[in-house]
Image: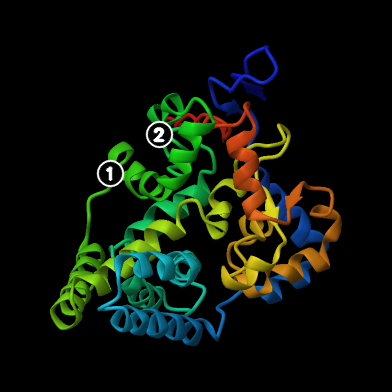
Amino acid sequence: MGAGMEADEGVMATDFFWSYTDEPHASRRREILSKYPQIKELFGPDPLAFLKIAMVVSLQLWTATFLRDASWLKLLTVAYFFGSFLNHNLFLAIHELSHNLAFATPSLNRWLGIFANLPIGVPMSITFQKYHLEHHRFQGVDGIDMDIPSQAEAHAVKNATSKSVWVVLQLFFYALRPLFLKPKPPGLWEFTNLTVQVALDAGLVYLYGWKSLAYLILSTFVGGGMHPMAGHFISEHYVFSPDQETYSYYGPLNLMTWHVGYHNEHHDFPRIPGTRLHKVKEIAPEYYDSLRSYRSWSQVIYMYIMDQTMGPFSRMKRKAAPKKDS
C-alpha cells in the first residue's frame, strides 16, 4: 500500500492511503467462521431493540416539550450534556436498523428507523441505510464509499484550527457529502421519512413553540461535533497506524452507543447486533487482541486534531474493481 505522505516528518498527508489489496473483513470473516462456526448462533435481531428505542425517543421528545420556555443558554447546556447523548444513541440505533437488527422483516426495521429518527429533527434514516450498506460492501472504494472525506474537505483542512472546525461540523459533512458526490434518486421510503419527520417537527412547533424543535436540532448538532460520542466517526477508520484500516473502541460509552465501538467485529459480522459483538471477541480473541484499539473517544479527537500528520486524507482508499466484459 502507498500513501501520499510528505517526506518530512510532521507534515500532513496530501493524498489518501492507497491499498492494493481487498478490504480485510471478508477474508477474516471466512477464516473465523471456519474455525468457530458457533459464531453463527449470534446472528439475528436484538429482541430488545424496539423497547430501547421507544424509551429514548419518548424521553427526548418529553424533554423537548419540557424546555419549551427555557432560555437559549439552558437549551444549549441541556442539549450538550444530555440531549446529545440521546440523539447520538438514536443515530446509532438507526445504524443498527440499517442492518435489519431489530426485526427479521426489513420493512419493519425501516419503520422503526423512521420512528427513531423523530427526535433527530432532520429526516435521515432511510437515506443513511442506502449509503451505509455500500460502505460495508465497498469499504474504501474510491467513488463508492461515501464515509470517506471528499477531496475538497481534505484540501481545506490544513492545521489544528481547521481540523477543529471540521470536527465541529463533521455531522454536516457526513450527511451532505453523499448528496453532493453520489446523489441517489429518492423513493417512496424517503418520502415517507420526510413526511413523518416534517409532521412531527411542525406539530412540536405548533403545540410547544420553536424552542422545543431547536432543542432537538441542537442535540443532534452538538452531539455530532466536538463531543465524546462523536469520537467514533474518527476512531472507526482514520488511519493512525498505516497497516490497519479499521479500529475498535472498548470503552464505557459502548453502553450508550449500541456497542458501535466494536467496529472490527461489526465489519467482520454485520449480521450480529451490537449487544452480542463482545462475544465475537471472546470466542476469537486471537483475531482482535493484536489489533490497535482505543479506550477513549475523546482522546481520539484530541489526537486527530493535535497530530500534525493527521487529517481528512488519513483514510484508506482502493480503486474500484474493473468491470468484467459481459
Q: List x then y, in percent, for residue 305.
A: 58, 37
Residue 67 visible in the snapshot: yes
Point 26% across, 74% down: residue: 212
Q: Residue furthest right?
A: 286
Q: Distance of mark 2 from mark 1, alpha carbons?
A: 27 Å
Q: List x then y, in percent, for residue 162.
A: 46, 32
Q: List x then y, in percent, for residue 165.
A: 43, 39
Q: Which mark is residue 326?
A: 2
Residue 312 visible in the snapshot: no
Q: Nearer the viewer, residue 215 or 289?
A: 215
User: Where does the C terminus fall, quadrant-wise?
Assistant: top left
Q: How many marks?
A: 2
Disc 2 vs disc 1: which is toward the camera? 1
Point 25% across, 78% down: residue: 69
Name the residue carrying label 1. 183
| Local SS, label 1 | loop
User: Which amino acid does the dot numbered 1 rest on?
Assistant: Pro
User: Which amino acid does the dot numbered 2 rest on?
Assistant: Ser
Point 74% across, 51% down: residue: 293
User: Where does the N terminus fall, quadrant-wise?
Assistant: top right
Point 21% across, 78% down: residue: 204
| Local SS, label 2 | loop
Q: Residue furthest top?
A: 7
